[in-house]
Image (tube, rainbow, N blue to C red):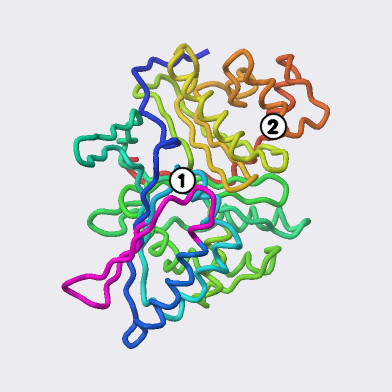
Amino acid sequence: MTTLTHAPARRPAHTTTRLRVVLLCDIMDGAQQRFLEAYEQLRHQVAAVPGHVTDQLCQSIEDPSQWLITSEWESAQPFLAWVDSEAHRAMVKPLHGCVRDTRSLRFSVMRETSGSETFDSTQQPVLDGVVRHALTFTVKPGSEPEVARLLAGYSSPAARVDERTRLARTSLFMRGNRVVRSVEVEGDLGAALRHVAMQPEVRAVEEAINPYLEQDRDLTDPDSARAFFMRAALPAVHHTAADRVSGKVTRHALLYPVRPGCGAAVAALLARQDELAVREGGHPFAGSTVFQREDTVVRVVDLTADPESVPALALGVVGPRASGVLARLTELGGHDLRSPQGMARYAAGCAMALVTDRRAKGA
């Protein structure tokens, strides 16, 4: 078995520190009053969302059409749960007719000084310069082989987006009729997604799979496209990786059968266990990213060994009691996680099929 030589891992993106969200808005000419009225209604609705702390509305002193909305949240989890919900889509709909363009930025609060008191988070940021995100959607049962063929056959778009943004890697998986596409971007994620969406080869594939989708979409219609990308968003809530790896690394993904209401707990468990795997060392573990929205939890893991040979590590249950916790949070389907054999069968049942995994040159 190949082994992993490691140094202290990069700290995870999953955090319990506060979250600051910055939304830059370019308001249409003549729509300022409608924007203010829409915001006035929206801010009271957002204030009632669990986890929301405060928000501010600011106007540029140099360009009156430029506005800034900042909000603070107890942590990333309540914000991500809300921003990807149907309730959020309904709340922000009045803004669509007022705003020409928006850009959303999200930050963990690391330091804060107020008077003589200084807030100092023990959480350290991920410093590898890569933004990770995923999209997920379902296709009509029976169409899976054709969808997989179409998704595997497209030509990769140019990796370079602009002077500061570059596509690093795209990995696409399927399990049953669910598709998960994870992307790694160096630079601006929004710019990268817009760049990919405009490429003719990508648009052709997206049009080809449209008839097979369980939920209709029209990517040529801005409202339909916006609704699809918000509905399909599967944010990364945790990433960790070893600094040095020996052996050939292969990529795998698992879709966990989460019990209703347990998605955040499953994601947090997997985050802790992957950090433990890196700290312990001696494992064929190169890194992982946990994606979660509500009760959809997908873990993309990089290993230097066959996952069947390390079922606990592949499944993400390294600690002695972790398998019992996972058993309480997910549907076991008759599998017994107390034995290596049962764990291996359960992991195989969670495994997603790799459709394509493409890395940009030099990544």
Q: Nearer the viewer's eye, disc 1 or disc 2?
A: 2
Residue 109 position in % (x across, y down) = 33, 42
Q: Residue at x 39, y 24 (%)?
A: 242
Q: Does 94 sit above or below residue 119?
A: below
Local SS, label 2: helix
Local SS, label 1: strand
Q: Is residue 351 magenta?
A: no
Asked which quadrant contains residue 150, the reply is: bottom right
Front in this rendered view, residue 43 or 319 = 43
How many numbered discs, if any? 2
Q: Is residue 67 magenta?
A: yes
Amino acid type for the residue under numbered disc 2? Leu
The C terminus: image quadrant: top left
Q: Residue at x 65, y 22 (%)?
A: 308
Q: Does 194 sit above or below residue 20?
A: below
Amino acid type for the residue under numbered disc 1? Arg
Q: Residue at x 41, y 28 (%)?
A: 241
Residue 138 lies left or right of residue 30; in this view the side is: right
Q: Residue furthest left?
A: 62
Residue 271 position in % (x across, y down) = 51, 30
Residue 267 position in % (x across, y down) = 57, 35
Asked which quadrant contains residue 61, the reply is: bottom left
Q: Which mark is residue 329?
A: 2
Write down the region rendered in magenta: 46-70
Mark 2 closeness class: few <14, some 14–19, many ≥20 residues within 10 Å: many
Q: Residue furthest bottom?
A: 30
Whole-number angstrom distance, CA of label 1 to CA of label 2:
33 Å
Front in this rendered view, residue 278 or 341 = 278
Q: Residue at x 57, y 65 (%)?
A: 228
Mark 1 closeness class: few <14, some 14–19, many ≥20 residues within 10 Å: few
Residue 105 lies left or right of residue 62; in this view the side is: right
Q: Which mark is residue 358?
A: 1
